[in-house]
Amino acid sequence: MKLTRILAALGALTVVLLLLFAGFTYWAQDEEPSPFIVAAASPYASEAGAEILRAGGSAVDAAIAVQAVLSLVEPESSGLAGGAFMLHFNAAQDDLTAYDGRETAPKGASPDLFLDENGEPLPFLDAMISGRSVGTPGVVKMLWLAHREHGKLEWARLFQPAIKLAEEGFQVAPKLAEAIARDPVLMQMPVAQDYFYRRENDGGRVPYGEGETLTNPAYAATLKLIAEKGWQGFYEGPVAEEIVAAVQNAPARPGTLTLEDLAAYEAKKREPICAPYRTYRVCSMPPPTSGGLTALQILGILENFDLRGMEPMSLTAVHFIAEAEKLAYADRDKYIGDPDFVDVPVEAMLDTGYLKSRADQIDASLSMGKAVAGQLKDERAFNWGLNQPVDKPSTSHFSIIDSDGNVVSMTTTIEGPFGSHLMAGGMMLNNQLTDFSFSPEEDGRPVANAVAAGKRPRSSMTPVIVFDEDGAFHAAVGSPGGSRIIGYVTQTLIAVIDWNMGMKEAISQPRFLDRNGALEIEADTVLVTIAPQLEQLGHKVEIKPLMSGLHGILVTPHGLAGGADPRRDGNVVSELR
């Protein structure tokens, strides 16, 4: 009898255990992963961000991991020795913050930085590949500031993916291989020639090609210092000393960057600029980038036209968008600079009445040709000369949303492909100072974007976050591309908002833009077929490759969706409910 009761009890216990186990198994199988998206310019970088998010990190945590990896695997475009702008949306607090990590000119910089002995602007390559072009890097300080406010994981943890890749190696992507192969001077540069080129038995050098493995122990050592010491690991000590030595001992036109310049650098929080477009609110970075303000001007001008009634990529749509771009780019060249040094008339430039007056200059049947800057109702704006920029498009953008709904839209750059071509601490040093106007005056008037010690050069970076009519997050997007960034991003926003495209479709559409010169049309696309008609409207058409690198996130009726530009090597990593 006792044995029977014992067996019965054991049977009951077994049933209970089985039920518990079954219940646990059912719950585990049904548990849905935390929703997140990382869209970045390299699968290595996207996966690093995803790894951090899976570990419970925030969007800012993931951004730090993504940037650290991009510095390694996409050194032609961005890096920790460059600059960046980050928009961050805190979902719980319904708060949008703009973080400015733009480089600054050293204390020794003067308005004639890029003038020759006769007072004439230097050829761009002479200015770019030199110590003079290197600005005080801002990325690390900016990321540190954002992490202090929005980070969840330990700072050091965020660099582990990049350290592992730097030590164990990564495969050279097609874009990097092409950039190395076509660069005219990289092989002659100290340090860089030993990193990007393999020495043959005969003493010659061969560029590393697509799919070959690169390691970067010097960069791993830099990351370990940053991981251990925080921002001090970059702006003080051996890494800072190596950066300064590379700049001051550059083979051509040594620069004046000092340890004091590095120690004095400050990342800044700025107020984002936002404006309505249709039923949405579009937000971006304020100056010193011209990107946000110019994109909002383009949209504000187009607000006066029914783009929804125009077919995407149609002759009419391309004409009206191009004309609006001409007008906004004209204002950009006159009025925008570092707001800590010049008064930028932001409110006047976004005034709806002013933008309506600019829209009234658009003729549906004829291009205006070269647009002139508008006359603002702001006395501060009248005395500026026109900026004379020269840019070589590179840069990178990534968009991230974490499981709490926090969003990062971040554009990051070292300026031209491979920046200044100087290398220190396993990193390419930026040539960001060439984003200043080479000429400090125009017709006797000062240029808003002239060089000055401690000043941030004007940028074109345009990270964007869009909110719907209820104030909820709707989209995040941005792109590389030099001054073309503005057109790439604006065209994508129009596709999403006016033409109801998904993010992937909007990013993949053929590119066109007008920077107040020629109307550039992407080669080998359907747009080429309407080039003759555009010329009949008075446009000067140029057909060429347009290498956008858009990465975005969109809220759709079916949930979140990400998109990566097929023109580059990026991808989207997501785990969604």
Image (cartoon, helix red, strand yellow):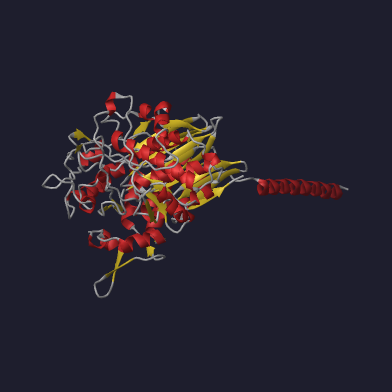
Residue at the far left: name it. Answer: 117
Quadrant, the C terminus? top right
Q: Position of residue 512 (x, y in %)?
A: 43, 49
Q: Is residue 24 left or right of residue 322?
A: right
For the view shown, which residue lies furthest in the right direction?
Answer: 1
In screen coordinates, is 376 left or right of 478? left
- Is 454 or 534 nearer to us in this picture? 534
| Residue nearest the viewer, comparing 557 with 160 | 557
- The answer to whether residue 284 of the structure is visible from this angle is no
Looking at the picture, does residue 340 appear above or below residue 363? above
The spot of residue 103 in percent (x, y) is: 29, 41
Where does residue 121 sit, x and y in percent of width and height?
Answer: 18, 46
Picture quadrant where residue 300 is located: top left
| Occupied quadrant, residue 387 | top left
Nearer the observer, 320 or 293: 320
Percent x, y for residue 20?
Answer: 72, 45
Q: Is residue 503 left or right of residue 207?
A: right
